[in-house]
Image (cartoon, helix red, strand yellow):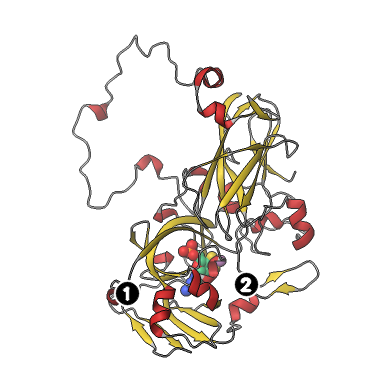
Amino acid sequence: MPAAGNGLLDRRTFMRGGAAFAAAITGYGISKNATAQPLANDPWSLTQGATTPPYEQRSRYESKVTRTLTNPKGEARVQNARTPLQLSQGTLTPNGLHFVVAQSGAPDIDPAKHRLVIHGMVKQPLMFTLDTLARYPTVSRMAFIECGGNSAPMFSPQPIQANLQALHGMVSCSEWSGVLLSTLLAEAGVDPKATWLIAEGADAPTLTRSVPLKKALDDAMIALYQNGERLMPANGYPMRLLLPGWEGNMSIKWLRRIFVTDTPGMTFPESKTYAQLLPNGKAYQFYFIEEVKSFITHPSPGHVMNGPGYYEISGLAYSGEGCIKRVMVSADGGQSWAQAELQKPVQDKAFTRFRLPWRWDGGPAILQSRAWDDAGNVQPTRAEFVALRGELKAPLPPTAFPNQHFNGITSWAIDAQGEVKHVYA
Ligand SMILES: Nc1nc2c(c(=O)[nH]1)N[C@H]1C(S)=C(S)[C@@H](COP(=O)(O)O)O[C@H]1N2
Ligand SMILES: [Mo]
């Protein structure tokens, strides 16, 4: 039941269990003493446990599972927090671990005083409070948010030795609930000549971005809840714009204004920070979509392989243009590929978890994943990506943002000692 070279196993026969499964997995759960000896009573089994608090905190043994911060003292410049994807499972990012980009910190907004206005080329300008928004039909959906600068270290000419969190940790996925922007725009009555809107946040630098009206009327949401509770302060409390699948900076947090117009704003951040530089010295002025992408989260740099034998290769795939259709995995640096199992449900513009059984023989291996979406896009190899979009001349620290929108294949090399390293293959 090998499915490809270097120990990749067929997911269908493997998942069914039976003799093949037993042969691969034997030994991990077996103890000679399991039946012979009663379990010892540890102290925690002998006394009353902790009191249930009104709001639960996770186990103190998990306290090292945290975001990494670029500006931990909150100096007057941008703050980034990266999600520990190598320590997570499934497809949903806990609110406390969602990545953050905040140009000047999280404003301490009093929800009772916050207002959202919609004006400009509309029949009827509107102003909303949190309470009035609650009267409108609510929708919920899974959606990833990815910073256009996520994976920027991959532009380095040599592979930067860093963990997944440093390389790809500026993407997270949540269930968002709120009101579709199209519902509010319908009430405002958009002028048929309008083509853009300009969204503005209530934080100090009032980050503004131009959004094509077409996207606003498609699946844009005024998000009020994140994984069932109100938004986290740093993720836009009490309301944010959510543009599923588009570069994160357009999903304006602490949203207070939507100005409907017939021309893009050409605001400072969209001409300076958020234009995609190309090798020929030109730039894409508006570059919205986070393209189809995947990476292996387990194993990944920092994980220690515990001797040869069975492992599950698992990772995340997503596309800003639709649903993930297929993920292929290689254990021999791209010479042969096997199809991974996709965790259901596979949702539009959301994380999809993929898994594949692997028998590591203890020798060198190069693990890669490659994703396809249902809009017909395929994730490029790094070489293909770099040929089109360029790379840097010199390596930069992993926290730099030299360029944006990297979606090429990521490669992890495993050596005979079981160390996992970032390589270009
Ligand atoms: N008002 C406002 N909105 C903002 C930002 C900001 O600094 N201020 N940062 C943007 C950037 S660059 C990104 S990538 C996303 C990140 O969303 P998150 O912090 O909830 O992950 O928010 C965007 N919205
Ligand atoms: Mo961003």
Labels 1 & 2 near each other (Cβ < 8 A): no
Q: Is residue 180 above or below residue 295?
A: below
Amino acid on which the number 2 mark rests in the picture: Tyr
Q: Is residue 85 left or right of residue 111?
A: right
Give the class, few, some or many, for how many residues have Cα within 10 Å of label 2's Cα (few <14, many ≥20). many
Outermost residue, front side = 192
Q: Position of residue 210 (x, y in %)?
A: 55, 79
Look at the numbered disc 2 and say if its residue's Cβ is closer than 8 Å to ligand 2. yes
Give the class, few, some or many, for how many residues have Cα within 10 Å of label 1's Cα (few <14, many ≥20). some
Q: Position of residue 383 (x, y in %)?
A: 77, 52
- Asked whether residue 160 appears in the rendered view, the answer is yes
Amino acid on which the number 1 mark rests in the picture: Leu
Question: For the residue labelled by badge 2, is the local secondary structure a helix, a strand or a loop?
Answer: loop
Q: Which residue is mark 2?
A: 274
Outermost residue, left side = 48
Q: Which residue is mark 1?
A: 133
Q: Which residue is pictured at 40% across the width and 75% down the height?
A: 183
Q: Which residue is pictured at 56% across the width and 43% down the height?
A: 315
Q: Is residue 57 left or right of residue 63?
A: left
Place residue 214 in its image quadrant: bottom right
Ligand 2 quadrant? bottom right
Observer-nearest of 220 and 237: 220
Look at the numbered disc 1 and say if its residue's Cβ is closer than 8 Å to ligand 1. no
Question: For the residue labelled by badge 1, is the local secondary structure a helix, a strand or a loop?
Answer: helix
Q: Which disc, if any, is residue 355?
A: none
Dot 1 or dot 2, earlier in sequence? 1
